[in-house]
Amino acid sequence: MAKIQNPKAASQTQIQDLKRRLVDGLQVITGEGVLSGSGHLSARIPGTETFLINPRFAGVLADPKDICTVNFDAKRIAGKGPIPSETVIHAAIYRARPDVGSVIHCHARYSILVGLLDSGLIPFNREARIFSDGVPVFLDSRGINGMAHAERMVANLGPHHATFLRGHGIVVTGPGIEGACISAIQLERACQDQLLMMSVTELKPLDDKGRGRNQARLENPYRAWPFLLYMHKVKSKAQIRAGIRTLDEGKHY
Ligand SMILES: [Zn+2]
């Protein structure tokens, strides 16, 4: 697991920016069929033991002013709320994984189906590459509403980047909001592709040197994220073009 240095506490301007990006992320993952009326996306507030999360209504309807601030005990400390009943999933991950900057929990259709297979995810294509280190299945997967239950899920997740909650949904982590959203989209798409291919052939994991995660691309998905913002009409083309920063410039997209 990558260690990160303790960053300086985020300013109010940075927190507002995180809220705006979180709302953008909710729009994109809903447009991609990953998030539905339920499910939640959170972002760690750097340098604090708090994070941001959408309240307990359909994430796609949230505005930045609706986004709640929650501490690592999963208690709401700002925002109107109420917060989702499974907010402990996020708190437990941020406590245990300093490399994680954003978490998604959702009930994505194809991911739930693959989580029920004995084979689990078979990383046989490009979409699944970022999960070639494995996606563990958590069996005690009824609604995760208590911290002890969430901590057992985190222990089962280990150093991995996603887990299937058997018959319930998925939890996906990322270095930041955009990377977590792209990971969740790729997992759902990989699961859909796997189910399609399993109906016609036996699948084997991809065996090439390009497997694995490209961390820099997930920290700054400078091609994928502007495309998704455009496709789901989250922003105008001019706004998106103005926000594009290439990898060398080191900004978030
Ligand atoms: Zn759930």
Image: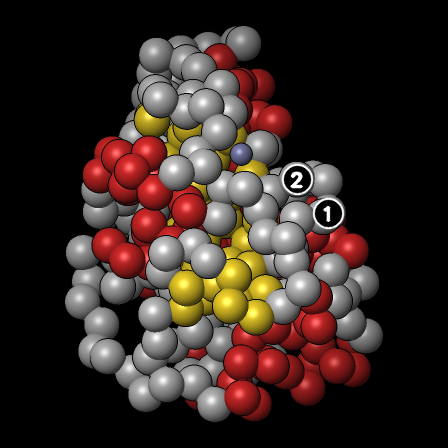
Residue shown at 52%/61% (left/top)?
Answer: 76
Q: Ligand 1 within 8 A of label 2's CB?
A: yes
The numbered mark, 1 or 2, whose residue comes first in the sequence reads 2
Tell me if residue 177 comes above or below residue 186 in the rendering: below
Q: Nearer the viewer, residue 17 or 225?
A: 17
Left or right: residue 81 compared with residue 101: right
Q: Ligand 1 within 8 A of label 1's CB?
A: no
Q: Which residue is mark 2?
A: 38
Q: Is residue 52 visible?
A: no
Residue 22 at x, y percent in the picture: 60, 65
Q: Quadrant of the N terminus?
A: bottom left
Q: Amino acid at mark 1?
A: Ala
Left or right: residue 144 compared with residue 14: left
Residue shown at 24%/54% (left/top)?
Answer: 96
Secondary structure under the numbered disc 2 in the rendered image: loop
Residue 161 at x, y percent in the picture: 33, 46
Residue 131 at x, y percent in the picture: 35, 41
Q: Nearer the viewer, residue 16 or 208?
A: 16
Secondary structure under the numbered disc 1 in the rendered image: loop
Q: Please tell me the numbered disc located at residue 58.
A: 1
Disc 1 to disc 2: CB gap under 8 Å: yes
Q: Quadrant of the C terminus?
A: bottom right
Quadrant of residue 226 in the image?
bottom right
Q: Nearer the viewer, residue 2 or 66?
A: 66
Q: For marks 1 and 2, give the CA distance.
A: 6 Å
Quadrant of residue 25 in the image?
bottom right
Q: Is residue 119 visible?
A: yes
Q: Amino acid at mark 2?
A: Ser
Residue shown at 75%/81% (left/top)?
Answer: 239
Residue 52 at x, y percent in the picture: 52, 65
